[in-house]
Image (tube, rainbow, N blue to C red):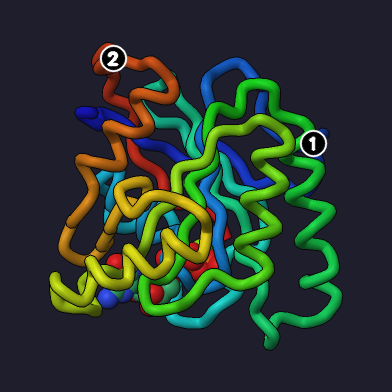
């Protein structure tokens, strides 16, 4: 995918605030601090389109981005970070549940798991929830640059086993080095059946939580 434009559209809490469901949409979900926002920035090759932070719990709203005028990327708030105030944590599940139920145009959810962690209950629950709803999932192992290549492959096998998937189903990704970017784009394009988008030169805008 050649990314010609990527712009922040809006932040939302409830479906009433979402942009119209008029384009294919891909959402990004995962534990707090797993690298969701950094992954989106790397995919669109904009360093600061989405705000990232070393403090977990940075993204607390549902943020919509428009890519090449023909595809929405949706950065979902992260789950499972204990230090996020309880009130915020309690809103996560309903917010994401409502989102998943409200987007007929949702084509795939990129489920991001830190390569150094074993998937926990949240990951299993999320994957089961998406499967039940017949939403395609694209599992990605983030922060691959933290491990040497041999160790990456071992982790890929171990995590795949814990999820009941084949190792090749898990894309090794690094927002830092760009590893896996092309592979993830190809997987997204296969899901949404998009070819390279027509050119458009809209100005970039930073945004989101
Ligand atoms: N080494 C390395 N660090 C990464 C990578 N991706 C993200 N990080 C770092 O991990 C931290 C969290 O990244 P974010 O992209 O903000 O994570 P997030 O999942 O959006 O976090 P929340 O919005 O808080 O849920 C930041 O300090 C990033 O620089 C990666 O591929 N490699
Ligand atoms: Mg984020």
According to the picture, the residue beneath numbered tag 2 turns out to be 195
Answer whether residue 22 is visible to the viewer in this image. yes
Q: Position of residue 179 (x, y in %)?
A: 18, 56
Mark 1 vs mark 2: give the one in front: 2
In the displayed structure, 95 sits above or below 192; it is below
**Residue 112, numbered label:** none
Question: Residue at horizontal 34%, vertical 25%?
Answer: 189
Residues 107 and 77: in front is 107
Q: Can the viewer see residue 51?
A: no
Which residue is found at the position 66% from the left and 68% from the top?
79
Q: Quadrant of the N terminus?
A: top left
The residues bearing labels 1 and 2 have C-alpha atoms spaced at a distance of: 29 Å
Q: x%, y% of residue 11?
A: 64, 47
Question: What SS does tag 1 mark?
Answer: helix
Q: Earlier in the sequence, mark 1 or mark 2?
A: 1
**Outermost residue, bottom direction?**
83
Depth check: 99 or 147 in front? 147
Find residue 170 and report its horizontal and vertical position in percent: 36, 52
Instruction: Give the residue displayed 69% in from the left and 22% down from the top.
Output: 104
Picture quadrant of residue 140: bottom left
- Residue of label 1: 15
Taking 97 as reference, is 166 left or right? Answer: left
Residue 176 versus residue 188 in the image, above or below: below
Q: Secondary structure at mark 2?
A: loop
* Residue 4 picture quarter: top left
Q: Which residue shows up at 42% across the image and 37% down it? A: 7
Residue 96 at x, y percent in the picture: 73, 50
Res 69 quadrant in image: top left
């Amino acid at each position: 995918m050649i990314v010609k434009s990527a712009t922040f559209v809006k932040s939302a809490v409830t479906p009433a605030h979402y942009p119209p469901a008029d384009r294919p949409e891909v959402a990004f979900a995962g534990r707090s601090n797993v690298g969701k926002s950094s992954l989106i920035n790397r995919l669109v090759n904009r360093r600061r389109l989405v705000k990232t932070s070393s403090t977990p719990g940075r993204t607390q709203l549902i943020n919509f981005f428009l890519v090449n005028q023909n595809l929405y990327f949706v950065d979902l708030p992260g789950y499972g970070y204990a230090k996020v105030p309880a009130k915020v944590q309690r809103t996560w599940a309903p917010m994401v549940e409502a989102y998943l139920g409200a987007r007929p145009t949702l084509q795939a959810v990129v489920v991001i798991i830190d390569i150094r962690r074993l998937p926990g209950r949240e990951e299993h629950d999320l994957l089961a929830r998406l499967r039940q709803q017949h939403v395609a999932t694209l599992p990605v192992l983030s922060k691959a640059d933290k491990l040497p290549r041999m160790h990456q492959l071992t982790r890929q096998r171990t995590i795949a086993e814990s999820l009941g998937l084949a190792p090749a189903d898990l894309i090794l990704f690094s927002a830092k080095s760009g590893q896996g970017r092309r592979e993830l784009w190809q997987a997204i394009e296969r899901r949404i059946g998009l070819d390279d988008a027509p050119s458009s030169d809209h100005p970039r805008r930073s945004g989101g939580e």
